[in-house]
Structures are given as C-alpha cells and as structure tokens.
Image (cartoon, rainbow, N blue to C red):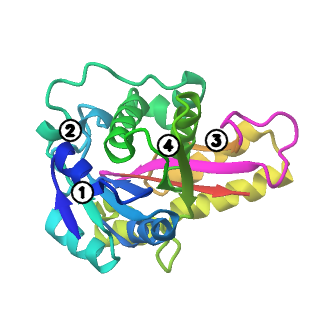
Amino acid sequence: MQVVHTIADLRAALAGRGRPAFVPTMGNLHAGHLALVRQARPLGDVLVASIFVNRLQFLPHEDFDSYPRTLQADCKLLEAEHCDIVFAPRESDLYPQPQTFRVQPDPRLADVLEGHFRPGFFAGVCTVVLKLFGCVFGGHPGTAVFGRKDYQQQMVIRQMVRQFALPIDIATADISRATDGLALSSRNAYLSPEERGEAVQLGRALQALAQAALALRQPLPALESDAARVLGARGWQVDYLTVRQRADLQAPEGKPQAGQLVALGAARLGKTRLIDNLEF
C-alpha cells in the first residue's frame, strides 16, 4: 500500500492502473469506513482512500481543531483491507492557496435539514469532494462510495455529479451499526459511557416516528414535534426529527406512502451531535 501526500504523487501512483474505486474519509476510521472500503474493492482496478479533515465544512464553533487525527492507525486498518493507495494530503497540499472558488449546491436540496442547521456545510463538502474527484479521477471514469448515514450528503453529491456530467458512479453503502443499533460514527468516541448508553435513543425515536407516520393518526408536523419533545425530555437538544420523501427530501404531500420515505434525525447529546436515518 502506498501513502501519498501530494496531488502529483497521487497521480503518479495512479498512472496506468486503470479505473479507480475511491472512498473519501476524514480519518479516525471505524468499522463503518472499512465496510465502505470492502464495498469499493470490486468496483475498480485500483482502490484509493483519502484521509483529509476538511476545514471548509466546519462552522467556526465546531470541532475542526479537536477532530481526531489518527493517520498511522488509519493506514494500518486500510492496509489490512488491501487498500492500494492512501491519499493523505496536508491542508497546504490540497489548498495551496485560499479556496476562494466554491461549489454552490442546489439550495432546495442543500439548505434544508443539515444545511439549515449548519449553513455553508454542503458548499464545503461539495468543494472538497469535487477537488478530490479531480485529483483521483482526473476526468476519467471511476466509482466513489459514500455511506448512507450521511443521507443528505450522498444525495447532494449525486446531484453534483449529474449536473457537472462527471464520469463517476456513486455507490451508497448501508449504515453500519453497533450491536445495540447505534449508527457508527467517528464522533461516538466523544460520548461518555452514560451518553453511549443513551445514544441508541436517537435511532429508536426515528423508528417510532416512522411507525407513527404510516399510521398518521395526527398530522405529520405534530408527530414530528411529539418525537422531538420525547427525545428532548431525555436530555437531548434536537435539531430535527422529520419524515421526508426519499426522492428530494421534501415533506410528503398527502398520506405518507411506505417505500418512498425516510425519517431523519440530528440531535446533540451532551457536547456530541449525532445523526441517523431510517428508510421506510
């Protein structure tokens, strides 16, 4: 396995090796990331993972400086998964000058939910992903794999790829969960033991909301408010618990139809912000 830090070295390592399969990460890898790597392996001729904590997608009050950086341990995990190339650029490698050109995603998709509570987040995501795509694929065909836990993010990236006519297939991997159902996340490491036991309640709240939405004994906004109130009573600070259409993340019109919906949630437990979702 090669570990490269500059764009020039990455392109040299990729030269003549065929179609890339690419897994972009911010490092501090866990079993969910490794599941993405395993899914990506048969989708290309050379398997590339990137590790880069992207300043552009963090708000000023968020955890950019304290976000765990564990490159040596991450590389060991990736080598065990037979990754071919790890691209781990320094900030000065990927952004040698201030990144004043930005990708502005469709606000109808990107300014709701995560985009509403984290303004500018998806512009930062799209900008770094487009730049990484340019580094890895160089305009040639390939496949990139993203996790379903970041549900809105993978939808935004799919739309970006379509609108820029990039020759890149986007594959989505199912959410990896702990045995008690908690969605795996690098930020789970921030949880205290007591918070870790409580953290499963976010997924359970989404399950209850999905069931209530299909029964529709109350208007959907009332059901969403009830779900947020129940979770809030347990000590969570809820950003959103909501039911949306899978196709466009807009609120469903009329009676919710099974097989077309997703329940999404984001809430803070102590100092840790968790997200999860459930298609139904």
Q: Which amino acid does label 3 sit on?
A: Ser
Q: Mark 1 falls on what kind of element?
A: helix
Question: Circle 2 sits on which residue?
Answer: 94
Question: Circle 3 sits on which residue?
Answer: 225
Q: Is residue 52 visible?
A: no
Q: Which of marks 1 and 2 is in front?
A: 1
Magenta span: chief secondary structure: loop
**Residue 153: numbered disc:** 4
Question: Circle 1 sits on which residue?
Answer: 13
Give the Cα separation between the discs numbered 4 and 2: 21 Å
Task: Give the residues drawn in magenta, as a range.
Answer: 247-272
Which numbered disc flags the more N-terminal residue, 1 or 3? Answer: 1
* Residue 98 to residue 225: above or below: above
User: Where is residue 246 shown, x and y percent of the image?
Assistant: 70, 45
Give the Cα separation between the discs numbered 3 and 2: 42 Å
Q: Nearer the viewer, residue 233 or 92?
A: 92
Q: Nearer the viewer, residue 59 or 32?
A: 32
User: Where is residue 174 shown, x and y percent of the image?
Assistant: 57, 64
User: Image quadrant of residue 77?
Assistant: bottom left
Q: Mark 4 falls on what kind of element?
A: helix
Q: Mark 2 falls on what kind of element?
A: helix
Q: Which of marks 3 and 2 is in front?
A: 2
